[in-house]
Each structure stands twice: as C-alpha cells, then as structure tokens.
Image (tube, helix red, strand yellow):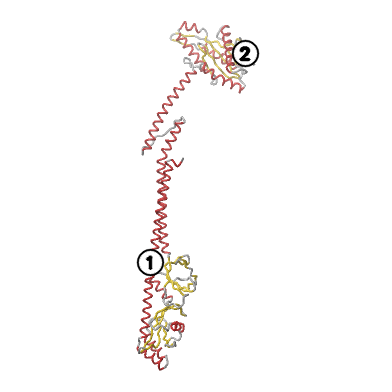
Amino acid sequence: MFLHTYRARLVIYSSILIVFLTGTLFYSYQYSYDVIMGETNKHLVRLQQLLNAHMKTERDELLRYATIVSHDLRLKEYMFIITDIGGDSKPLQQLFDRQFGWLPIDRKIIIDNEGHLLIGENHTDMAVTVREKALEKSSSVFYFQGKSGLEVVAVKPIKYRDKVLGKVAVSHYLSQEWLNSNKKILGGEFFLVENNNIVNSTLSSIGSTRFNISNNLLNINNTPYRLYQITLPGKNNKTLQLWFGLSEESIRARLTQHQDFILILAGAGIIGILIVGLVIIRNFTQPLFHLMHATSEVSKGKIPLLGKLKVRNEFDELSNHFADMLQALREKQIEIDKTHAELEHSAITDTLTGCYNRRHLLEIFPKLLAQAKREKFYVYALMFDLDYFKKINDAFGHIAGDQCLVHFAHLLIENIRTSDYAFRLGGEEFLILMVSEDIVTASKLADKLRQITEKNPIRSGDQLINITVSGGISYANPKNSAEKTLNQMLSRADIALYQAKRDGRNQICISSHPDDTIELTTPQANTS
C-alpha cells in the first residue's frame, strides 16, 4: 500500500537520482583513472625510448673511443712489432697511456689474434668475454657482468696493412654514479637484478630485496613501481637484468585527490538530493496528511480543529478552504447540538414550570432505585398539591394560577438537594424523588417546603395571593420491578396526600401502608 503513495514515489525518484549521480561519479572516476594510467604508460614508453636512445648514444660514443684507438698509426706499428717480430708489450702500454689517457673509459684491453693480453693484464674477466667474441671480425658493443659489476664494452679490430693484428676493447661501468645521473635525467628508478634479487638500485636503503614483479609492477615498502626491462645487447649473463621504473606514488596521489573530490562531490550531491527530497516530501505530504487525517476524522463523525495556513502554494490554499468548511460544519454542529439539547430538555421538562415531566420520571426512577439498592438506602416520594387551586383560578384568573404554579416550582427547585429531582405530574400536582437513609430527612424537607410556600405569597398585578400546599410521603418497595414499585409508591403517596387534604390541608401526611417492609419514623404530622 505504501508503494502506491506519492511519498513512496518521491522516495523512489530521489533514490533513482542518487543512484544516477553515484553511477555518473563512479564512471567519471573510472574514466579519470584510465586516462591517468594511460598517460602514465605513454610517459613510461616515452622515457623508455629516451633511455634507449641515450644508452645507444653512450654505446656509439664508447665505440668511437675504441675506433680512435684502433686507428692510431703508432699503436698499429707497435702492435705489428710485438705480434710479427716479437717484443715487449710494455712500450705499447706506455704509448696507450700517453696517447689515450684522456679517454673517459673505465677499463681497456688489447689482445692479439692468439688471445694474449698485451694491455690490461688485470682485466682477465673482460679478456675472456672478448676472446669468446674473437670470431667476430667486425666491431661490436655488448654488455657483460664483470668482476666489478655490469659494464658496456666496445670492441674494435686493429688492422695494419690489411692485416688484423688483434683487438682493442674499452668499457664503461654502469655504476651507481651512472644510475644516479640517469635517474636525474629521466626521473625514474633503476634496479639491477641478479637471480631475482635486487643487487643495486637508485633507491636508498633497500638492501638486497627480492625482485617479485607481477604485471610489470614491483612493490617496495608499500610503494608500487611500474617497470620495464632495459634491453642489454650482447649481455653474456642472462641472470643479470636492468630494469627502469616509475613510482605510482604520484599517480596514487593524483587518483586519491581525484577520488576525494569525487567522494566529496558524491556526498554533497546525495545530501543535497536527500535534503531537497525531504523538503519536497515535507512540503508535499504534510498538508496532504493533515487533510487526509481531517477527512478521516470527519468520516468518523468528528470535526477536528484545522488551523489556517499562510498561503504559499495550492496545498495551503486547499487546506484553508477545508479549514473554512470544517469551521462552518463546527458552527452548524454547535447549532444542531444546542437545538438537540433544547429538544431533549423540552422533552423531559414541563414547559411552564421548568420541572421535569412524567416522561423523565419513568427514565430516572430505575436509576434511583438501583442506587438505593447499592447504598442500602430508600427512594422516597414527596407528592405536593396546591390547596384550593381551583378557587385561585376562579378568583384571579388562569394567568394568576399559572403564576402560582411557576412560583411554587421555583421554591421546590431552589430548596431541594442537588441529588433530588422535582417533577410536575399534571395540573397543580408536583413530586420530589430523593434517595435517603431514613424517612426523617424526607419528612423534614417536605415540611420545610410547606412552610416556605406558606410564608411566600405571590403578587399578581396588584393582588397578593397566599398559597399553601398539602403533601404526602411514601417510599419505594425494592422487592418489585421498577415500574410496579413506582406505581405503588406514587399511589401510596397520593393516598397520603389526600389524607392530608381531608385533615384540613396545609400539612404533610406519611404513608404507613401494611405492605411496607420497613418501619417508618413518623414526624409531627398526620399519618393516614
């Protein structure tokens, strides 16, 4: 049922907007991630190309140094003397140092065609590698793992008169200095790896670390590096590798910054949508809910109080119209209730005197009888009749007679207890019903009313009319039904009343019928 309400629809629409916003921001983040990673890969490729070009330039430069040495005429002549005639190689060493000491190389050797070292007796590891390439008659440049680390070697044949006398080889270490200088140029990190262990690196304080690479990513101290392997032409040791990499820390920082921005934007968007949605729901559903609640109350027969609103939209205007309608209904209801109360009052009240009528007597007596039974009291009937009422009508007129009835009724109403009931039975006959513990209270009240009536004459025009009343008292027999008990009680009260009239009027007579189940204490009045 909730899903069919407009409130549910607004919630669903707001949820759709939130999902759409979240999806859009997620796509934006993923797209930015792909762009950044793509640019990083392109940058790495460009750095790879730049590094390869730089290393090729270094190899070409090293080969040029070897060429300078191999083309020196005096060196060739010394080589010819040593290899063909025989002689000491010491002058060749001196010549090399004197002629080529300026060359920026780390190691140099000269070997003859037989593989004998003429220069560089301390560099046998380098000589071994050069001898392995002795079959190659042309120039060559290669990398190899020497006793001092990785180095690049340039080899050039020495020819004299179209005859190859031997080879000259010069090398340059890929030392820590070389790694650091290239790091400054390229901005990345270098890793020299042997047997899956990092033996040298431009990173400080990493020591000997396992080289565990996955998808070209290496994680060192929780920092990933995107790597590519540098191709080393002619490297004689396949277990030795040189890698170049870029830290993804900066990439992560950019992505984190972008991610934070996306999260802030998403959070602000979601909060904004929620606030707008709640405001819409509140502004839309609150007046509608009030109207629905008011309509429901009206359908139950109630007329709720609906306050007027400041008109800001159609719902406020509708609510105000509904409030006006409820106010009109409330006024009509008050008028109807007042009329109904008047009708009810007139239905149980004597129009002339204001006392209750016989209809209300039949309604109230069962309640008084039940109350008397609960409290173990009695219901007493005090019946009164105005003395010589016909003479008053004949002497003073019916209007004066009615005034006498009204006057006596007011005396009754003003002097009885709040728990007693005064009735007009018809004509000049009145009745008081009261619940009391004994007859003494009833007889005292009856005699009090008799005396007050006698002492309060009524003025009609210029005439002063003295009136007296006679009264009879009886009580209810609780053994019988309410209707029968009422009839018996009124009948005995009526008998006692007429006994009082026969005895001279203006007195109270108490019934002592032999069927009474209790003994009555007779006050100073006549007993029938």
The secondary structure type at the circle numbered 2 is loop
16 to 200, vertically: above or below: above
* Residue type (three-letter) at the residue carrying disc 1: His
Please name the residue that numbered disc 1 is placed on: 43
Mark number displayed over residue 76:
none
* Residue type (three-letter) at the residue carrying disc 2: Thr
Q: CA distance from mark 2 to mark 1?
A: 128 Å
Residue 75 seen from this side: no
Q: Nearer the viewer, mark 2 or mark 1?
A: 1
Spot occupied by residue 440 in the image (x, y as percentages of width and height): 60, 16
Residue 162 seen from this side: yes
| Label 2 CA crowd tier, 10 Å (few <14, some 14–19, many 20+) | some
Looking at the image, which is closer to me, 339 or 399? 339
- Left or right: 427 in relation to 170: right
Please name the residue that numbered disc 2 is placed on: 522
Spot occupied by residue 149 in the image (x, y as percentages of width and height): 46, 78
